[in-house]
Image: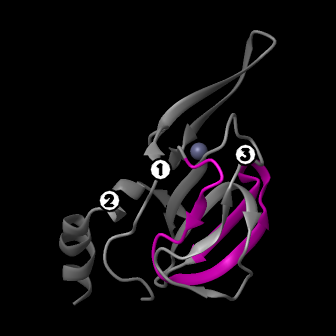
Amino acid sequence: MLWNGPFIHWGKEEADFADVRNYIYHGQKVDQQVHLGYDLSDVQNGPVQAANDGRVVWASDLGIYGNCVVLDHGYSLQSLYGHMREIDVKVGDMVKKGQKMGIAGQTGLAGGVHVHFGMQIDGVQTNPREWWDEHWIKDRILSKLQ
Ligand SMILES: [Zn+2]
């Protein structure tokens, strides 16, 4: 377990976890997706910070997420940061909570500058809000592991 205490976030929470999105092209609905993360706005030219201690396992383009960093926090818990303009870390780097990993942007499928922040366990997307909550972490995770 590489992480310690609640995960951090910054900026303003815009799109919520599990929002349903319709994609319209020429007036026709062409797709529907469930948004599996949070969009953090008010981050123009701002640093993208590591939400907790971890190891960089991805640091390049990743489809709709654009320039993307994925951190592994141990026990198959990972955090993901999408739409970055600039990435300052590389795969294998160990980062500390709050450490700058690059600059926010709008690469990939993004309507404006924001950071898409997601968390997953063993590849399953989970609600980041829980990982921002110290009490939830204590009740649901730490007490079970001890
Ligand atoms: Zn998003």
Compute the Cα span from label 3 to label 2. 26 Å
The residue wearing badge 1 is 11
Q: Is residue 96 above or below residue 86?
A: below
Residue at the extreme front of the image, as rendered: 45
Asked if disc 2 and disc 1 are in contact, CB closer than 8 Å, the reply is no
User: Which residue is rendered at x = 53% and y = 57% of the image?
Assistant: 118
The residue wearing badge 3 is 106
> Which of these two is toward me, 72 or 33?
72
Q: How many numbered badges does the structure rendering display? A: 3
Instruction: Tell me, yes or no, whether the highlighted magenta stretch contains residue 75.
Output: no
The magenta span reads 43-71
Q: What amino acid is at disc 1?
A: Gly
**SS at badge 1:** loop
Toward which corner of the image does residue 104 lie, by quadrant?
bottom right
Q: What amino acid is at disc 2?
A: Glu
Instruction: Tell me, yes or no, whether the highlighted magenta stretch contains residue 68.
Output: yes
Q: Is residue 31 above or below residue 122?
A: above
Local crowd at mark 3 within 10 Å, few (<14), some, or many (≥20)?
many
> Which of these two is toward me, 73 or 85?
85
Q: What amino acid is at disc 3?
A: Gln
> Can you give x and y, in whole percent of width and height, for residue 62 in the image?
77, 59
> Can you give x and y, in whole percent of width and height, for residue 50 in the image?
53, 72
Quarter of the picture for ligand 1? Answer: top right
> Which of these two is toward me, 12 or 116?
12
Local crowd at mark 1 within 10 Å, few (<14), some, or many (≥20)?
some
User: Which residue is rendered at x = 79% and y = 53% of the image?
Assistant: 63
Give the mark toward the camera: 3 or 2: 3
> Can you give x and y, in whole percent of width and height, for residue 9 in the image?
43, 59
Residue 105's disc is none
The residue wearing badge 2 is 130
**N-terminal-most mark, 2 or 1:** 1
